[in-house]
Amino acid sequence: MSSDFEAYEQDFGTLTAEITNKIGRIPKLAGEEKTQLVLNVDKQLEEVRELLEQMDLEIREIPIQSRGMYNSRLKSYKQEMEKLEKDFKRSRIAYSDEVRNELLGDDASSSESQRAHLLDNTERLERSSRRLEAGYQIAVETEQVGQEILSNLHSDREKIQRSRDRLRETDANLGKSSRILTGMLRRIIQNRILVFILGAILFLTIVLAIYFNLRGH
C-alpha cells in the first residue's frame, strides 16, 4: 500500500511542478492562447484533486500505527494544492506589465485598481461559499439526526404497543383463570355441603334404626 502512496506522490510532484510553471506563464498571455492555457491548468488541477483522493483512500488501508506519517504528508500536499488554486485564480485575471500596457495603454493604472477590486470580491465570494457549504453540511447532519430520532421514536412506539398487547393478553388470561378458580371453589363448597347433608341423613337414619330396634325389644 505504501508503494502505491509513493507512486501517487511522484505523480503529484510532477503535476504540481507543471502547474506552477504554467500559472507563472498565464499573466504573460492574452486572448485565445491564455484561455487554452487556463483550461489546461484547470484540467490538471482536477487530476491533482483525484490524486489527493487516491492518497486518502490508500492511507485508510495502511495499519493505524503507520498512518500518522502519511497523514502529515497528505496534509502538506493539500495545503500546497490550496496555494496552487489561489495562485491560479489570481493568474487568470492578472496580466504582465507588457501585456497590460498593450491592451489598456493609459488605462493600466485603472485596470490594476479594478483587478484588486475583483480579487477582493472573489475572496468574499469564496468566504460566502464556504459559509454556505458549512451551513448546508450542518443542515444535512441535523436532518440525519432528526431522522434517527424519528426512527427511534417509531421503534419505541412499537415496543410500547407490543407491551400493551401483552398486558391485555395477560389481563384476559388472569380474568379467565379467576373465573375458573371461582367455579372450582364453588363446586368444592357445594360438594362439602352435599357430603355434610348426606352424613347428617346417614347419622339420623342410624339413630332412628337403633331407637326403633331398642323399642321393639
Image (spheres, rainbow, N blue to C red):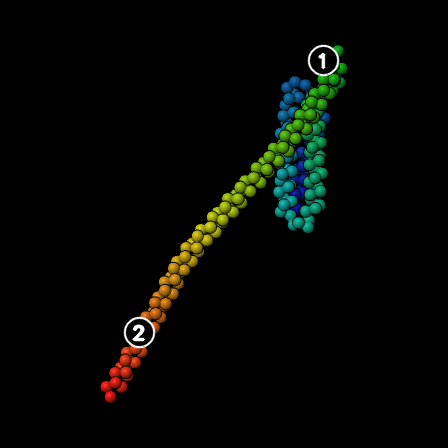
Can the viewer see residue 91?
no
Q: Quadrant of residue 112?
A: top right
Left-right relation of 211 to 65: left
Alpha carbon separation for disc pair 1 and 2 = 134 Å
Residue at point 71%, 28% (across, down): 87
Disc ID at residue 68: none
Q: Where in the figure is residue 192, as x and y percent of width and height?
A: 35, 70
Residue at point 66%, 46% (across, down): 2
Disc ID at residue 198: 2
Please say if 170 is above or below 185. Answer: above
Left-right relation of 163 to 57: left
Amino acid type of the residue tagged 1 in the rendering: Leu
Please say if 31 is above or below 61. Answer: above
Left-right relation of 114 to 185: right
Residue at point 41%, 60% (across, down): 178
Q: Which residue is mark 1?
A: 104
Amino acid type of the residue tagged 2 in the rendering: Leu
Provide the secondary structure element on which disc 2 rests. helix
Q: Where in the figure is residue 54, as x and y percent of width and height?
A: 62, 40
**Image quadrant in which the C terminus is located:** bottom left
Residue at point 39%, 62% (across, down): 182
Q: Where in the figure is residue 132, as x and y percent of width and height?
A: 63, 30
